[in-house]
Image: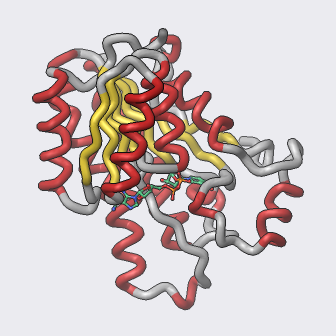
Amino acid sequence: MRFENKVAIVTGGGQGIGKAVAQGLASEGASVVISDINKEAAGKTAEEIEDSCQTKTFAVETDVKKKEAIHNLVALAEKEFGRIDILFNSAGICKRIDIEDISEEEWDEMIDINMRGVFLCSQAVMSIMKRQQQGRILNMASLAGKVGGIAVGAHYSASKAGVICLTKSFARNLGPYGITVNALAPGPVDTAMIQDWPSDVREDMARQAPLGRIAMTEDVAEPALFLLSDAAKHITGEILDINGGILMD
Ligand SMILES: NC(=O)c1ccc[n+]([C@@H]2O[C@H](COP(=O)([O-])OP(=O)(O)OC[C@H]3O[C@@H](n4cnc5c(N)ncnc54)[C@H](O)[C@@H]3O)[C@@H](O)[C@H]2O)c1
């Protein structure tokens, strides 16, 4: 039980990668706060976890665009459990759109959720983790944040490049307090986020991978759990590729 007595907040925990990581944390002993803008999905994840794991779990409707909502989330978690050991920033949106068609509003929304949301959530837990002299923050970056938007919009890839840099900045600032900050940079992962991608685009991405397929959520969840565990205590500022070999750097 790698996460016994640990308390985790998972943003975007209602579905997809966030849900898979929340389930993994809870199955190994963590108390998990499921946060999502989708109240129903967050509640369902929390219910499923409570039914299958012997840990305390609850859901909080949170829009990561809103600082007040994030502070409410962190306050509720701290009030209930008295500490916060893990923050997994998974909330995000993605859009396939040509670079010349991205409107100002779409740019702002993408950056607000994917990048500013990670900044605000990490900032909101840092004083608690500093006080504890211990903590783990893990962010969802993307292959697109390293190579630019090909299958996805330029605003998405820019937001994820921002997440990569924020990860390193938080890692540098929080290292002296025993807090690690890392990110995952997956290629395409088979979740709702890419379900409307044309099949030829998905097949092309699979063909580009030496391992010959796109990722499933468990391909991402397992490395996430490793980086959140005590075994990864000397890893910080790492941006971990999970792309079947599409990019090797
Ligand atoms: N699926 C992929 O191919 C892929 C690849 C690389 C990185 N990622 C990243 O992984 C993360 C999880 O993606 P996923 O594949 O699980 O997608 P998903 O769409 O299945 O899940 C995203 C979750 O984020 C929530 N969310 C959206 N906007 C929010 C907001 N403003 N506030 C709070 N919650 C919000 C959604 O309700 C949803 O539950 C995202 O950051 C995504 O960019 C995904």
Place of residue 199 in the rendered image (x, y in percent of width and height, measured from the top left): 80, 70
Residue sitting at x 53%, y 33%? 238
Residue sitting at x 42%, y 29%? 51
In the displayed structure image, the side of residue 58 where residue 201 appears, left or right? right
Residue 77 visible here? yes
Place of residue 97 in the rendered image (x, y in percent of width and height, measured from the top left): 59, 81
The total number of labels drawn is 0
Which quarter of the picture shows residue 46? top left
Examine the rendered structure and indicate whether residue 146 appears above or below residue 178.
Answer: below
Residue closest to the eye, 234 or 11: 11
Examine the rendered structure and indicate whether residue 191 appears above or below residue 204.
Answer: above
Examine the rendered structure and indicate whether residue 177 appears above or below residue 98.
Answer: above
Query: Where does the C terminus fall, quadrant-wise?
Result: top right
In the displayed structure image, the side of residue 196 where residue 200 appears, left or right? right
Examine the rendered structure and indicate whether residue 28 appears above or below residue 210.
Answer: above
Place of residue 209 in the rendered image (x, y in percent of width and height, measured from the top left): 84, 50
Residue most extreme to the front? 51
Place of residue 47 in the rendered image (x, y in percent of width and height, measured from the top left): 38, 38
In the displayed structure image, the side of residue 46 where residue 190 appears, left or right? right
Residue closest to the eye, 164 or 86: 86
Residue sitting at x 20%, y 60%? 66
